[in-house]
Amino acid sequence: MHVLTFSLAAAVFAGALVGLAGAPLARAQSGDVAYHATLSPLNASVTGSEASGEATFTINGDDLTIHIEMKGVPPDMAHLQHFHGFAEGDKASACPTAADDKNGDGIIDLVETEPVAGTTMVPFNDNPLGTDLLALDTFPKADANGTYTYETTVSLKALEKAFAERFPGQQLDLDRRVIFVHSIPDSIELPSTVQSLGDFPASLTLPIACGKIEAGSAATPQATPAS
Ligand SMILES: [Cu+2]
């Protein structure tokens, strides 16, 4: 909870600065929220609920703290979550839309996300430096209300090193990546048209939320309360 308290305080502080100065912070300083993403639902017709949430990336020296809060996800189960991006070139990823449902089955599956979002890159699980991209038991588990909070802190240098080894010529470049949250109960029947990775079940990899990572902290509310 210590880190959470700190990052919340940093966000409030950054928000206060923006409010006072009337201008965005020129440059991320130590402890600021360096990047954020707002996650919106995907495939809600399958899950029956709208998965949404917020992610923040806070940098404090060499510490990168990743904080993700989700609601409306299938309850009582773990959820894969990663950032995805293009392993070659400098193309920016985007979250898929209905137009990316190329086979027209009404479901945007993982394979259909690849042309717009790229490939699975870094897991937000108990070891973001590792290569366990699909080991569900290493990922956060939603409670009975379909909510979860994930937070971990890694060495930014170590993450950059691990990333460069797996994606030669690429840098983290978080602001051209997207975050996906995946996984639905295997009790939900999916049409056979829904594709997955290799032999992994489509229920495991089905995207349920996506958010584009953007530089800076989340937008602070513009409206002032009515007096
Ligand atoms: Cu993913």
Image: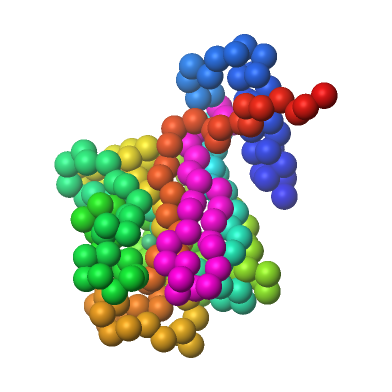
Residue 16 position, x and y percent, is 68, 22
- Does residue 46 sit above or below 191 in this rendering? above
Where does the C terminus fall, quadrant-wise?
top right
Residue 132 position, x and y percent, is 39, 67
Q: Is residue 46 magenta?
A: yes
The residue lying toward the viewer, choosing from 154 and 45, is 45
Magenta residue span = 30-54
Residue found 76% across the figure and 28% down from its top: 225
- Does residue 4 sit above or below 59 in this rendering? below
Residue found 17% across the figure and 41% down from its top: 89
State left or right for residue 6 relative to residue 65.
Answer: right
Which of the 4 quarters of the picture holds residue 18? top right
The residue lying toward the viewer, choosing from 219 and 222, is 222
State left or right for residue 129 relative to residue 146.
Answer: left
Q: Residue furthest right?
A: 227
Which of the 4 quarters of the picture holds residue 98? bottom left
- Does residue 61 sit above or below 44 in this rendering? above
- Does residue 192 sit above or below 142 in this rendering? below
Residue 193 position, x and y percent, is 26, 80
Which of the 4 quarters of the picture holds residue 206? bottom left
Ligand 1 shows up in the quarter that is: bottom left
Residue 177 position, x and y percent, is 35, 45
Any part of residue 93 in sight: yes
Residue found 53% across the figure and 61% down from its top: 51
Residue found 32% across the figure and 83% down from its top: 191
Q: Is residue 174 magenta?
A: no
